[in-house]
Image: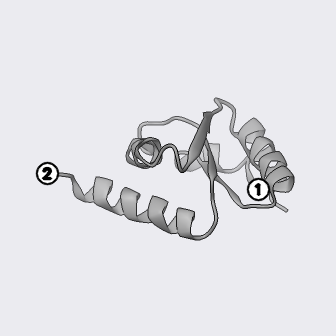
Amino acid sequence: MPTLNALWSRALVQELQRGGVREVVICPGSRSAPLALAVAEAAPELRSRVVLDERVAGFLALGLALESGRPTAVLVTSGPSSRPGPPACR
C-alpha cells in the first residue's frame, strides 16, 4: 500500500502534467525522494533530467521551457538549495 507521501506526490505530478509540464529537472535529495519517484513513475509522459547543482538546474529548466514553449518543473529539496533557482525564473 502506498504511503501518504507517495499519494500526494503522484497527485502533484498529475497536476503538473495537466498544466502542460513535460520535463522535470531534478536535484536529488532525501526530502524530495517521494516526488522524484513519482516523476520517474510518470515516464515516458514526463522526461526527467538529474542535475546536481541547483543554479544549473534552474537555468536548464529555463532553457528547456523557452525551447519547447511549455513550462518545465524544477525539483529541489528544502532549505538553502531552494534559493539559487529563482534567478532563472522568467
Q: Secondary structure at mark 1?
A: helix
Q: In terms of image quadrants, where is residue 52?
A: top right
Q: Is residue 79 left or right of residue 30?
A: right
Q: Secondary structure at mark 2?
A: loop
Residue at screen point 29% across, 59% down: 7
The disc at residue 1 is: 2
Q: In terms of image quadrants, where is residue 16?
A: bottom right
Considering only order in the chain, which callout, 2 or 1, is on the residue closer to the N terminus?
A: 2
Res 90 visible: yes
Q: Position of residue 51 (x, y in %)?
A: 65, 32
Question: Residue 30 or 34: which is nearer the viewer?
Answer: 34
Number of other residues with Cα within 10 Å of mark 2, as a class: few under 14, some 14 to 19, many 20 or more: few
Number of other residues with Cα within 10 Å of mark 1, as a class: few under 14, some 14 to 19, many 20 or more: few
Name the amino acid type tagged 1. Pro
- Can you say whether 67 is above or below 17 in the image? above
Q: Position of residue 71 (x, y in %)?
A: 71, 61
Q: Position of residue 62 (x, y in %)?
A: 81, 51
Q: In terms of image quadrants, where is residue 56?
A: top right
Q: Quadrant of the C terminus?
A: bottom right
- Can you say whether 77 is above or below 11 in the image? above
The disc at residue 65 is: none
Name the amino acid type tagged 2. Met
The disc at residue 86 is: 1
Residue at screen point 69% across, 39% down: 54
Residue at screen point 41% across, 37% down: 30
Q: Residue furthest top?
A: 52
Residue at screen point 55% across, 49% down: 46
C-alpha separation, residue under disc 1 versus residue under disc 2: 36 Å
- Can you say whether 14 is above or below 42 in the image? below
- Can you say whether 31 is above or below 72 in the image? above
Q: Residue furthest front?
A: 44
Res 26 visible: no
